[in-house]
Image (tube, grey):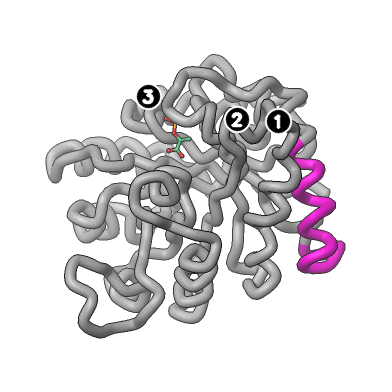
Amino acid sequence: MRRRSLIVANWKMHGTVASVQSYLETMVARAMPTGPEVVICPPFTLLPAAVLIATGSEVVIGAQNCHWEDKGAFTGEVAPTMLVDLGVRWVIVGHSERRQYFGESDQTAAARSQAAQRAGLDVIFCLGETLEQRETGETMTVLERQSAVLAGLDPARLAVAYEPVWAIGTGRTATTVQAQEAHAALRRRLAGLLGTEAAAALRILYGGSVKPDNAAALLAQPDVDGALVGGASLDVEGFCAIIHAAPGGGRGAGE
Ligand code: PEP
């Protein structure tokens, strides 16, 4: 099954009002309805400006996190309903930096994802093993544990991002063989959790030091349906080059 490529920019804690404007104006001018689906996830402060510029275009705006309640005494938090109110369509949940630095657990990631979908957001659910877990042969056990929570989610509003922790922001990318192996195993796992048809339609993104020069090979793998791009998404030309490297993007494999 051919799934439309999904290329997501995770700006992390970067960007200014001026930079979001010029970046998004470039993206809006270049994104094509027939090309890969493009989602830009700036920090919360830049979401209003991003939504304003992207509205009516092929570029979609996502957030990097959301809370699991719709309102309440949660100082500093942002509810999924607030994101929907703003015009945001996607949210990243369970990113390894949230798991590593902010106490995100499988349970809180599950609660955030369920709340996000209830509010009407599509979820990019991140999972992946650490270097130590890979080296001790625990990769699949970790992915099975982290993916168990997906059983409670609507697959039509879901993408899964396989992000080996050892490849995030390190410049060290999974090989195409490692990426395809993990994605294929995840798809088999998702078939058990969500049903064969849903798993076949669901997009599994690769994340971890994706750059313009390694994107085409990774995105050509049969079970790699897109990319979650951190550092390399901050440069609009580099990010556009990654989009072009995806199948359907103009110069991906077989085009
Ligand atoms: C990420 O933030 O999800 C990510 C994959 O970062 P980087 O591309 O910088 O490794």
Residue highlighted by disc 1: 136
Q: Is mark 1 within 8 Å of ligand 1?
A: no
Please determine whether, in this image, residue 193 is positioned above or below residue 232.
below
Q: CA distance from mark 3 to mark 2?
A: 34 Å
Magenta span of residues = 182-198
Confirm or deny contact between disc 1 and disc 2 (CB under 8 A). Answer: yes
Which of the 4 image quadrants contains residue 30?
Answer: top left
Which of the 4 image quadrants contains residue 20?
Answer: top left
Quarter of the rendering occupied by the C terminus: top right
Name the kind of residue labelled 2 in the image. Glu
Residue highlighted by disc 3: 237
Residue highlighted by disc 2: 132
Seen in the image, is 22 located left or right of residue 129? left
Residue at 45% across, 69% down = 112
Q: Is residue 195 magenta?
A: yes
Confirm or deny contact between disc 3 and disc 2 (CB under 8 A). Answer: no
Residue at 79% across, 36% down = 222
Seen in the image, is 63 located left or right of residue 164? left
Name the kind of residue labelled 3 in the image. Glu
Image coords of residue 154 (percent x, y): 64, 73
